[in-house]
C-alpha cells in the first residue's frame, strides 16, 4: 500500500534519531557545550547535527542572542511534537523494564515559587542525591503563574507554586493546603495582635518582592470590590531577604504558615492571622501532558509529593 505522503518518510529518515535527540537536548540546555557533554559527543558533532536539522527544515532553528541559543517559532512548534514522540518511544522501549533511578543521569529542572523552594530545595536535593546520584536538580524561580512554554518546551520538568489560574490542559496535583499569614518582627507595633481585620490592611506598611511591582497581585484580586487594599511601599529582590528586612523595620509581609513557622526557628518573628479573604494558600504541582506518562517524571512527582507531605506534617 503506497504511503499517503512519501516525502514525510524521507524527511524522517534524513532527520534520524541522533539528530532529534540532539535537537531535544539543545532545547533543554540552550548550549552546544552542555548538549555535547550530555550526549557524550564532541561540540563539532553537535554543530553538524544542528546544521542537518537547519537544512532539513529550511529554518535557523536557533539564533544566538547575547551568547545564548534562542529557538525560533518553528523550533518551538517542532519540539512540542518531538518531545512527545521521544517520550512515547522511551516508554515503549522501557515497557516491562524496571525503572532504576540510580542509572539515570541528566538535569531535573523544577520551577518553584520562593515559598516552596525554601521548604523543599534542600531536602529534595538530599533525597535525590541518595536515590539518583547521577542526577542534578536545578531550581528555577517561578513568579506568580508559570509560563506554559517552560513546561511545553521542556525547560521545566515540573512547576510548583500558588497558581490561581491554571489551564486545564496541564496535569496537576495539590501538594498541600495552607493558610497565608501576616509576619512581623516581635518588636513591631502589631506583634501582640492575633488577627488583622480588613480595616487594618491600609494602615500597615507591606513588604513585597520586586517581580510584583506594577502588577496585579492575588491580594488585589481577592480584595477587589471590598473597598480595601494593601499598600506595598517596599520591594526586595529575593524572598530570602524578608526575615532580615522585617527584623530591622516596622514592615509586615505575608507567606504560607508552614514557611513562616520555618522562619520562626531562626528569627524572632510573630505571626498574625489575616482576614479570611486573604488566607487561602494552595500549593500546586504542575507538569506537561507529554510528561504525564514519562517514568522519570512520574518518579520525580512521587518523590516531591511524598517528601512535601512529610515536611508539612
Image (cartoon, helix red, strand yellow):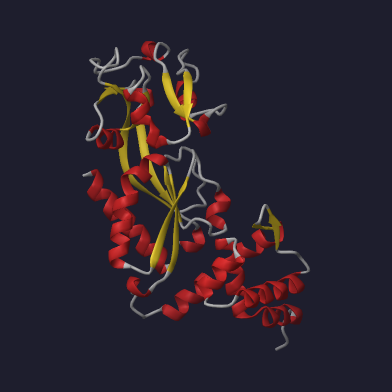
Q: Quadrant of the N terminus?
A: bottom right
Residue 238 or residue 114, whichever sits in front: 238
Residue 171 or residue 104, whichever sits in front: 104
* Residue projecting furthest to the bottom: 1
Residue 197 or residue 168, whichever sits in front: 197
Question: Image point 65% across, 76% down: which residue?
Answer: 44
Question: Image point 31% across, 32% down: which residue?
Answer: 179
Q: Is residue 64 left or right of residue 260?
A: right
Residue 24's quadrant in the figure?
bottom right
**Location of residue 46 with respect to 154 vertically, above or below:** below
Q: Position of residue 222 (x, y in %)?
A: 45, 25
Q: Is residue 235 left or right of residue 56?
A: left
Q: Position of residue 87 (x, y in %)?
A: 50, 70
Tally of numbered tags: 0
**Location of residue 174 with respect to 221 vertically, above or below:** below
Q: Position of residue 3 (x, y in %)?
A: 72, 83
Residue 136's quadrant in the figure?
bottom left
* Residue projecting furthest to the right: 58
Q: Quadrant of the C terminus?
A: top left
Residue 293 or residue 55, whichever sits in front: 55
Q: Position of residue 155 (x, y in %)?
A: 53, 57
Question: Image point 54% across, 28% down: which residue?
Answer: 213
Amino acid at each position: 500500500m503506497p504511503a499517503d505522503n512519501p516525502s514525510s518518510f524521507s524527511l524522517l529518515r534524513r532527520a534520524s534519531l541522533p539528530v532529534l535527540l540532539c535537537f531535544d537536548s539543545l532545547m533543554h540546555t540552550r548550549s552546544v557545550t552542555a548538549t555535547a557533554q550530555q550526549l557524550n559527543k564532541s561540540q563539532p558533532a553537535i554543530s553538524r547535527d544542528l546544521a542537518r536539522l537547519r537544512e532539513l527544515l529550511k529554518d535557523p532553528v536557533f539564533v544566538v542572542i547575547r551568547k545564548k541559543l534562542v529557538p525560533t517559532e518553528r523550533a518551538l512548534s517542532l519540539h512540542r511534537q518531538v518531545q512527545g514522540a521521544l517520550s512515547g518511544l522511551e516508554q515503549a522501549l522501557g515497557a516491562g523494564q524496571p525503572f532504576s533511578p540510580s542509572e539515570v543521569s541528566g538535569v531535573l529542572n523544577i520551577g518553584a515559587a520562593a515559598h516552596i523552594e525554601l521548604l523543599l530545595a534542600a531536602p529534595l536535593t538530599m533525597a535525590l542525591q541518595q536515590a539518583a546520584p547521577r542526577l542534578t536538580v536545578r531550581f528555577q524561580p517561578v513568579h506568580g503563574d508559570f509560563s506554559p512554554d517552560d513546561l511545553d518546551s521542556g525547560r521545566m520538568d515540573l512547576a510548583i507554586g500558588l497558581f490561581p489560574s491554571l489551564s486545564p490542559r496541564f496535569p496537576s496535583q495539590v501538594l498541600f493546603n495552607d493558610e497565608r499569614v501576616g509576619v512581623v518582627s516581635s518588636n513591631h507595633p502589631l506583634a501582640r495582635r492575633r488577627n488583622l481585620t480588613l480595616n487594618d490592611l491600609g494602615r500597615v506598611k507591606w513588604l513585597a518582592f520586586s517581580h510584583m511591582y506594577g502588577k496585579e497581585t492575588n491580594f488585589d484580586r481577592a480584595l477587589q470590590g471590598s473597598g480595601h487594599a494593601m499598600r506595598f511601599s517596599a520591594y526586595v529582590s529575593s524572598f530570602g531577604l524578608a526575615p532580615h528586612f522585617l527584623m530591622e523595620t516596622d514592615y509586615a509581609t505575608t507567606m504560607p504558615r508552614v514557611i513562616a513557622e520555618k522562619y520562626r526557628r531562626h528569627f524572632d518573628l510573630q505571626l498574625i492571622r489575616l482576614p479570611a479573604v486573604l488566607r487561602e494558600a494552595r500549593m500546586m504541582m504542575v507538569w506537561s501532558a507529554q510528561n504525564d506518562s514519562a517514568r522519570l517524571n512520574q518518579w520525580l512527582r512521587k518523590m516531591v509529593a511524598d517528601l512535601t507531605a512529610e515536611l508539612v506534617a
